Amino acid sequence: MERIPYSELPEGIFEPLMAIEEKLKNSSLDNKLLELVRLRVSQINGCAYCLDMHTKELKHAGESEIRISLLSAWEESGFFDEKEKAVLHFAEALTVIDDKPLHNDVFETLQKHFDKHEISFLSLAIAQINTWNRLMKSFGFKAGNYEVAQV
């Protein structure tokens, strides 16, 4: 059920989020890596709209079907390199927040592949997709209608 249709949202409600998206787009991070993060976080959060969107974006970016299909089992699939594994582990740690602190080993592994600026942008990207997931679920946006580069 679509709870609040897009046409009935307050004008400009997404402008701050889109400004962050633009900042991420202009960062040094690889877009395909960011899309993998967005898809994985959307899997964890169960956001159908975002799953549809980021699956389509990854396919458009040339990502293979097998890697998209096995993303939820990235640790054991053998299809992701160490850099991607470090990012996916970090994304999961920041998405599944519980009463435990972020373990230093997660961050230390990330530092082997990224500098502080890149880690800052990765943190922002993870927080951003978590926000999008929650908004899309709250508004009840339907999966299936997204077209690549729609936003």
Image (tube, rainbow, N blue to C red):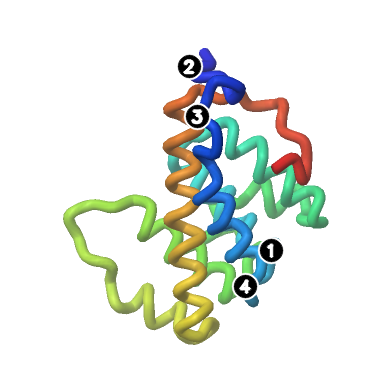
* Alpha-carbon span between mark 2 and mark 3: 14 Å
Please say if the residues under marks 4 and 3 sit with CB atoms less than 8 Å apart: no
Q: Nearer the viewer, residue 11 or 101?
A: 11
Q: What kind of residue is marked 2?
A: Arg
Residue neighbourhood size for the residue with mark 3, other residues' Cα within 10 Å, grouped as few (<14), some (14–19), many (≥20): few
Please say if the residues under marks 2 and 4 sit with CB atoms less than 8 Å apart: no
Mark 4 — residue? 27
Mark closest to the chain's N terminus, 2 or 4: 2
Mark closest to the chain's N terminus, 1 or 3: 3
Please say if the residues under marks 2 and 1 sit with CB atoms less than 8 Å apart: no
Side of 31 relative to 50 (left or right): right
Q: What kind of residue is marked 4?
A: Ser
* Alpha-carbon span between mark 1 and mark 4: 9 Å
Q: Residue furthest front?
A: 11
Q: Residue at x 45, y 35 (%)?
A: 135
Q: Residue furthest left?
A: 99
Q: What kind of residue is marked 3?
A: Pro
* Alpha-carbon span between mark 2 and mark 4: 34 Å
Please say if the residues under marks 1 and 3 sit with CB atoms less than 8 Å apart: no
Q: Position of residue 118 (x, y in %)?
A: 53, 77
Residue neighbourhood size for the residue with mark 4, other residues' Cα within 10 Å, grouped as few (<14), some (14–19), many (≥20): some
Q: Secondary structure at mark 1?
A: helix
Q: Secondary structure at mark 4?
A: loop
Mark 1 — residue? 31
Mark 3 — residue? 10
Please say if the residues under marks 1 and 4 sit with CB atoms less than 8 Å apart: no
Side of 142 relative to 87 (left or right): right
Q: Position of residue 31 (x, y in %)?
A: 69, 63
Vertical arrangement, residue 12 with respect to residue 97, above or below: above
Q: Residue at x 58, y 38 (%)?
A: 50
Please say if the residues under marks 2 and 3 sit with CB atoms less than 8 Å apart: no
Mark 2 — residue? 3
